[in-house]
Image (spheres, rainbow, N blue to C red):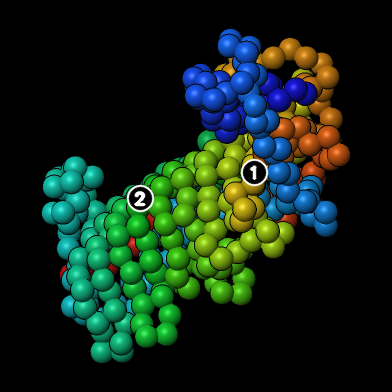
Amino acid sequence: MSTTTFLSSRLAGVATLGLLAGACGKNEGDTGAAGSGELDTPAAELVMPDLDGVDIDQTFVDAIAIALAANTQVAWQGHSTSLARQHIGCPDLYVGPPAVLVDDDQIAEDAHGTSWYDDCTTPGGLFYRGLMYWDAVAEGAGDAETSAGRTDSGRRSLIGAAVVGDEVDTRFQFRGDAADSVTRVTAPGYERWTYSSTLSATLTGIDAFDPIAALTPGGWRAEMYTYASGGDADFLELRGDLYLFDHRIQDRFDSVSLDIELPGPTGSAPDACQLEPKGWIGVRDENAFWIDVVFLPLEGSSAPVPAYDDPQYTVCDGCGTVYVRGLEAGPIGEICPDFGSLWQGGGITVPPVEDYVLDVRDNL
């Protein structure tokens, strides 16, 4: 695959820089022939990172797992856990959104939901500073023992800028907004669920990330869209960007950027490719060098360029082409990472509808 077919938008930036450089006029003293396009000083050689000792296949498997874990569930759980430690009057709780969010046109004035807005410290030394607004709805209907089945659904949103902590730890720190929804249909011998999350936020704190068990214990900054389904049809879609504050993938990579569609064992039509994702995944090391893998081309409205018809690069073989700093990595070539652990090891978690209830009315 030539570099011109690489779907990552980062190449567009490289091309733009090249065009700008080529458009520059000759400086006084240049000896190249006018109009020849030749320059006295050759371009600096592009430095390529040393990838010896890096498990490239596992790097991209880890990147998807970490991006999948960057969703509204983590933010919601961290907020609800920190709020469970409240003391009456700290923080102050309100019905409806804070006025500052209404004034900034972030929330409608007549929005339902609950909020806290305070700068206080509890008798136990836990401080609450900032504001948070949340809204959630959970519904259910039907009978799971009948052929018609039962449908349960929930949706929730979280927005604000706040920190909760004490002299020892930051318990919960959030800035941004997050929303997700879940639907589950159950009947005798049948189950289907869908989950979607939209996240644009910074999140840290031990109430959101277990210091030992969490994939990214230090937290992250993320712009991430997640869609997943399971039961009768396994499917995963991830789009966005993620920066890790402390954790490093393979002890080296601090950022993930991806636009990927990944069918599971039951997620593809009979004539579709079940072995290989569609799209691309990129990781960045601490020197700002990007390493990307490109799989089958995306199709439809999400594709950055029209789909191309080239059997060499659209074969369903579970493999993708690796690029380093936007150039095809010849020594590495293609890799064939195994994403089966995402389905077999419970990598995709779906919150129960009961989690979509955060009731603090007794403290109002």
Residue 182's x, y, as percent? Answer: 47, 45
Decide if residue 92 is on the left or right side of residue 333. left
Q: Residue furthest bottom?
A: 123
In what element is the residue under mark 1?
A: strand
Quarter-wise, where is residue 130 in the image?
bottom left
Which quarter of the rendering shows the N terminus?
A: top right
Point 60% across, 49% down: residue: 288
Q: Is residue 298 visible?
A: no
**Which amino acid type corresponds to the residue marked 1 in the rendered image?**
Trp
Give how far apart the Cα atoms at labels 1 and 2 are: 28 Å
Are discs 1 and 2 less than 8 Å apart at CB?
no
Density class for disc 2 (Cα within 10 Å; few <14, some 14-19, many ≥20) is many
Residue 10's x, y, as percent? Answer: 57, 33
Q: Count every numbered label the image shows and give the total.
A: 2
Residue 217's x, y, as percent? Answer: 56, 68
Residue matched to label 1: 290
275 or 266: which is nearer to us? 275
Point 63% across, 23% down: residue: 39
Point 71% across, 25% down: residue: 3
Residue 96's x, y, as percent? Answer: 18, 55
**Which amino acid type corresponds to the residue marked 2 in the rendered image?**
Asp
Which quarter of the rendering shows the C terminus?
A: bottom left
Q: Is residue 324 visible?
A: yes
Point 38% across, 66% down: residue: 173
Q: Mark 1 or mark 2: which comes first in sequence?
A: 2
Question: Looking at the picture, does residue 68 appear above or below residue 77?
Answer: above
Residue matched to label 2: 177
